[in-house]
Amino acid sequence: MRYHPAMNLISASPENSKSTRRLVWTALLVTIVIGLAVVVIPIWIIQPFKPQSQRGLEVSYALRRISPYLTIIASLGVVMLTAWLWRGSRWFLKVILVILALPLFAATWMARQNHFEWMFKPHANLAYAPAHEAAYVDDGDVVLAVQNHGEAVAYPVRLMAYHHLVQDVVGGTPIVATY
């Protein structure tokens, strides 16, 4: 290692420079993976059409709480590492750096959105269909049935899985049917 008085830095020999660049590339990739993971894992755990466990929900919500902060830190780290790698890189490596950073920047934006609300948005235009008009419900279909104060309704599970939350009034009592 040589001391560089003009920049007050220690510059690496050519052998160390290669290993330093490899280390920075590794740090860049690990930072991107961590930043993406804290956004993607909660979405993966709580995806519709898949059973969820209590532990999975806890992990998902914990990651969801820290993802806005962690993705900002990861994005700042990626910007610094990219700036360091940018100097002296060929054009195709610069393109690769940008392509690698874009998903993290998208995840940084996504971490600030309520994607759980997107996945479990209540159905806005719910309407009753009398049994004789509900030809889309077969006799063998599984339904979620609710009876309250003499009024009974059935929600086909096949149709509810997409919406997840059905706000309704059954027998004068507001309910939220969910599956």
Image (cartoon, rainbow, N blue to C red):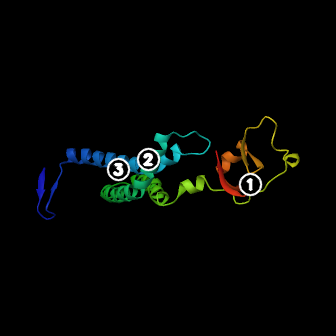
**Classed neighbour count for the residue bearing mark 2: other residues with Cα under 10 Å, few (<14), some (14–19), many (≥20):** some
Q: Residue furthest front?
A: 149
Query: Do we see residue 158 in this rendering?
Result: yes
**Tag 1 and tag 2, C-beta contact below 8 Å:** no
User: Which of these two is toward me, 94 or 36?
Assistant: 36
Residue 3 image offset from top left, x and y in percent: 11, 56
Q: In the image, what residue occupies the spot 42% across and 50% down?
A: 62
Check disc 3 and give the amino acid type.
Leu
Q: 83 left or right of 64?
A: left
Q: Which residue is mark 3?
A: 28
Q: Is residue 62 above or below residue 109?
A: above
Q: Earlier in the sequence, mark 1 or mark 3?
A: 3
Q: CA distance from mark 1 to mark 2?
A: 45 Å
Q: In the image, what residue occupies the spot 82% across and 52% down?
A: 129
Q: Secondary structure at mark 1?
A: loop
Residue 92 image offset from top left, x and y in percent: 42, 53
Q: Secondary structure at mark 2?
A: helix
Check disc 1 and give the amino acid type.
Gly
Q: Quadrant of residue 98?
A: bottom left
Q: Is residue 45 above or below residue 6?
A: above
Q: Residue furthest bottom?
A: 6
**Classed neighbour count for the residue bearing mark 3: other residues with Cα under 10 Å, few (<14), some (14–19), many (≥20):** many
Q: Which residue is mark 2?
A: 37
Q: Secondary structure at mark 3?
A: helix
Q: Which residue is mark 1?
A: 171
Q: Nearer the viewer, mark 1 or mark 2?
A: 1
**Classed neighbour count for the residue bearing mark 1: other residues with Cα under 10 Å, few (<14), some (14–19), many (≥20):** some
Q: Earlier in the sequence, mark 1 or mark 2?
A: 2
Q: Residue furthest top?
A: 140
Q: In the image, what residue occupies the spot 47% across and 53% down?
A: 103
